[in-house]
Image (cartoon, rainbow, N blue to C red):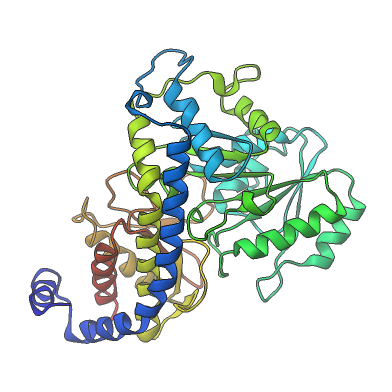
Amino acid sequence: MIELTKQKLKQYYGISDKVLELYEQTINDIKDEFLKYDEIREYNQLKVLNALQQERISESHFTNSSGYGYGDIGRDSLDKVYARIFNCESALVRPHFVNGTHALGAALFGNLRPNDTMMCICGTPYDTLHNIIGISGKENIGSLKDFGVNYKQVDLTSEGKFNYDKIKNELENDPKIKLIHIQRSTGYGWRKALLVSEIKEIIDFVKNIKPEVICFVDNCYGEFIDIKEPTDVGADLIAGSLIKNIGGGIAPTGGYIAGKEEYVTQASYRLTIPGIGGECGSTFGVMRLLYEGLFLAPHVAMEAVKGALFCARIMELSGFEVLPYYTDKRSDIIQAIKFNDKEKLINFCKGIQQGSPIDSFVQCEPWDMPGYEDQVIMAAGAFVQGSSIELSADAPIREPYIAYLQGGLTFDHAKIGILIALSKII
């Protein structure tokens, strides 16, 4: 960091010499780690470029359909581009998904029927799925449970690994298990994200026992962090959000579902209605943004990973417990920091908000956020509301007070935001 930049950080944000010393050590420690992710970024950029070229995308695909949206070539061709990238039969990419949870819900409701059982094998799933499944305690809200779908859960081991013995026992003794849910990212847990190699191992294990079961992966936060995606290693179905990795910080909204055609089609009937599926849905002039965001996504996702590496090392040097460590192989963009202190957690998030390009003057506070069981504090001064590929941090207000940092359209911005946040607590 040049001296003038240091002076401006002190002048604008009151960054101390102590924090800047930690910065210098952190940069020196993580520089070799960056080389590994640069290679992954280059490969995925090639993959996206080739998919766009193979589908002969042109300016005519940046359509602005209205009404029913029949024959929207931009929409239909983007589905094909995604299917190529994910090396699968079909994809459904739509601005009509309001978030990743909506895409996940459509996939679940589309492929589960009364008396079927879904089984989560990563322990308790992300908070916003609880209402969908019917484990939130709320009744008659139209959850899967309300429609007669059963739920089972197999927790991870204390080492954060799959419990193979228990999974095998459930599969062999419950003929109603129709779908296995695998959450790639950490969610609001204290574990590492699942590597694609680990996802392949568990899918192979499940298929050897019960080949007909649907292996469904929540792919949120994981796109383009490895050279392979879950659909490359046997996942039948995946889903995610366009305002996370794969939207490149450009997509203004939306989500996707990808995988085997029969399962994607069933999911499409829950995005719209049976018999219509993906054939309808005007795209409001956003297609260029969805294409451009996808094109930028391999680069932007790695900028976010670099920000996470930086956060992991500087927070560790500052005396906080972090997961994953900066040397760990990553499978998502999330960095967890354990504060064991409510006020430090809140002040860290307030620092991330202060370092944002938008709404930097806002004081974020814990609140009763829809879909969450605890109060949540969310620092997200983003160009796209709630975009977690942009620098953001959020946390449920519960012990041991863990913050989850993600995003950063540029590494330089991520560094600045983290330095401001750190200055709030040391």
Q: Is residue 177 above or below residue 203?
A: above
Residue drawn at (45%, 27%) of the image: 75
Residue drawn at (41%, 52%) of the image: 45
Q: 124 and 70: which one is in front?
A: 70
Residue 325: x percent and y percent?
48, 78
Image quadrant for the N terminus?
Answer: bottom left
Task: Report whether residue 254 is seen.
Answer: no
Q: 234 and 212: which one is in front?
A: 234
Q: Is residue 185 above or below residue 248?
A: below
Q: Is residue 81 left or right of residue 284?
A: right
Task: Report whether residue 42 is seen.
Answer: yes
Q: 413 and 88: which one is in front?
A: 88
Number of numbered discs overlaid on the protein picture? 0
Residue 274: x percent and y percent?
65, 19
Residue drawn at (43%, 76%) of the image: 339
Taking the view exactly as shown, the residue that stands out farthest to the right is 173
The quadrant in which residue 333 appears is bottom left
Residue 155: x percent and y percent?
72, 64
Residue 281: x percent and y percent?
48, 21
Residue drawn at (73%, 32%) of the image: 147
The quadrant in which residue 24 appears is bottom left
Q: Is residue 359 above or below residue 80?
A: below
Q: Is residue 204 left or right of residue 395?
A: right
Image quadrant for the C terminus?
Answer: bottom left
